[in-house]
Structure formats: structure tokens, C-alpha cells
Amino acid sequence: MNKIQSLAAVAALCVLAFFSGCHELPDYDNTPQGNFEALWTIVDEHYCFFADKNIDWDEVGDVYRAQVRTNMSSKSLFAVMSAMLDELRDGHVNLSAPFATSYYRKWWSDYPHNFDARIIQQNYFAFGYTSLGVADYGVLLSNVGYLRWPTFDSGLGAGNIDYILASFSMTSGLIIDIRDNGGGMVSNANDLASHFVNQPFTGGYIYHKTGPGHNDFSTPYAVTIKPVGDGHIVWTKPVVILTNRGTFSAANYFTAVMKQLPNVTVAGAVTGGGCGMPVSYELPNGWGIRLSASPLVDATGRSTEAGVEPTPGCEVDMDPQDAFDGRDTMLDFAIDYIVALSSR
């Protein structure tokens, strides 16, 4: 018999708050039934989006519990458990075994891709763009800056971001392309956002679980975005954030934060969501379960788990014929939008 133990804290932002709400979990046998019950209970007591998604977890448990057999193989048990976790419809939820990791893909696979990096690299820059760390950037022919930020797994220092923004000083505006940015560290998203604000403001709020009930949450804690600091560049010209369904987790958060700024427009398709800060646990058999435990909502208190909508009137998808002809419909929209603003 193994006691379920937490393997990781949520994040530095909420680690203390998270552990203040921990409670003892019962022991479960290392059997198919014991591992199933351990998994169901961990999700039941720690997952944070049951109400948002109208999920009856008791009913889900009854359906999949009936499929568990005493002598079933590990792979068969993994398949049952993974199917149960898919009912959460959450890209942050994973079951990890030595032979596989489950992953819910329908949050992006049922939507248009809306991005082709090669089209931009070849037809807009003739491969003459500049790369610095995670970023690719350059000035488009319409005198609009273009910054591709594909991940928040790593970031750039304030001086590096200054250097990039300085290269756009003569442009009429900036496009930040975070399509297919699957997220990473919220701190890296905040570091980038800090170059677009002149004073501290509330980017959103985070909650943590205070008990095993589905609605046992703390009061909200404000997440404050602070300016980058003296001596660094703060961008105040027009900005268009380009998003698609692959814009997820920390990139989804970045979109919600930036959308509040008066000079920022979000264009493209609704983001992929993923606003729950994940935490991991271990089952009796050693498998790991990661799940969304602490919701991070936008500044209005609205959950963005289902995604952040583009600015009204700025919803646009890639046109297949345009893509065939080497054009990015969404990028062209953003360019035209900034050009139109500069001509007013």
C-alpha cells in the first residue's frame, strides 16, 4: 500500500497558497481497482473546472469504474483511466506510465490549424528574419514590425527585448505572433508583457483549493503586471496579437493580459484556453497524474479555460487558397489593421 504524495507544487506564484489547502488522502491498494479509485479521488478533490465545464464526476466515475477488472493488464487499465480523464476536456491533464502518457488533443485538433511558419519565413521575409533566443523578428514591407514568440518555456532578458523593440522604432506598429505557442512559464509571459505597460495593473486573479469539495476555493489573489523598469523600452504604439487554437496555457494568459491594454488588438481565432495551474500526484503503482488545480482568471474574473476571443471584428482564419498562393490571411489582416490605424 502506498500513500498518495504530491510530486510538485503549482508554481512559485501560488505554491504557499496551494499547500495551505492540502489534506490527507486515504491509502489505496496497488491493484487495478485501487489505482482507479486513487485517480478518481485525486481528480475529484483537486481538479478545479468541474463547474465551468458542467461535469458530473460521480457519473463519469460510475461509467469507467464498471470497466475495471481485477486481472486486467496495465495497458488496459491505462486506456480506461485515460478515457476517463478525457472527459475533463483539458490539455493540462496527463496520466503518465512507463510506456505512455495520455494527452487530450481535441482542444486543438477539432479546429483549423491557422498557422504555417514556412509561408511567413519564405514569402514575407525571404528567410531574412532575425532570430534571438526564442524569438524571430523583422520589419515587414508595409513598415510593420513582426515578432514571432513561439513558446514561454524560456524567455529573454529585458535587454534582449529592448534590442528587439528598438529595431521597430521607425515602424507604425507591431504584430506579436503567438500562434501555436503552447505556453510555458507565466513569469516569462509577464516579462514580455512588462514592456507594454507604463504602470502596474492587475492582469488577472488566481484561486487555490481550500478543501476537497468541488467549490472549495480561496478568495482570489491578484496577479500584478509591473512595468519593466527605468532605462528599458516600453512600447506604446499599436500592437496586434495573432492567435490560433494552439495558443495555450501561459500564451492564453498572455493574450488575456495584453487584451486589456488600450493599444492592443487580438486578431485571429479563439485561443486554446488552459487557464488552470497544474499540479502532479503519484498513484500507488507509481504512475503520475497531472491536473489543473488552481484557476487563473482574467481581470474581470472570467475564466479563460475555453479560450480568449479575438477583439470584436478581428476574427479571421487562414484561407486555404491564400495559403496555397503563399499568403497568410491572418497576418495580412493584422498588417492592414495597423496600416489603417497609422493613416488616421
Image (cartoon, rainbow, N blue to C red):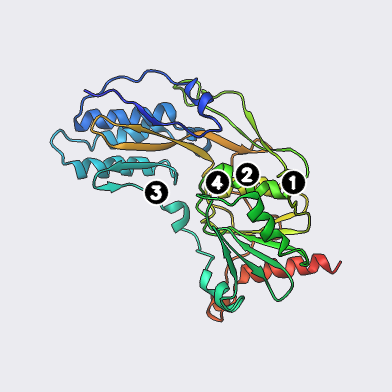
Q: Is residue 2 above or below residue 141?
A: above
Circle on res. 197: 1
Q: How far apart are labels 1 and 2 at the CA level? A: 11 Å
Say which label, 3 or 2, has the lower sequence index: 3
Q: In the rendered view, does 118 fall on the left or right side of 43?
A: right
Q: Secondary structure at mark 3?
A: loop
Image check: 182 left or right of 40? right
- Amino acid carrying label 3: it is Tyr
Name the spot of residue 284 as percent of width and height, x first: 25, 29
Q: Amino acid at mark 2?
A: Asn
* SS assignment at label 1: loop
Instruction: Categorize mark 1 by other alpha carbons within 10 Å: few (<14), some (14-19), many (20+).
Output: some
318 over 247 or under it: above or below: below
Residue 303, image x and y in percent?
59, 39
Q: Are marks 1 and 3 in contact (CB under 8 Å)?
A: no
Q: What residue is shown with label 2?
A: 190
What whole-number distance in Å separates the C-alpha atoms at marks 1 and 3? 35 Å
Labels 1 and 3: the sequence-earlier one: 3
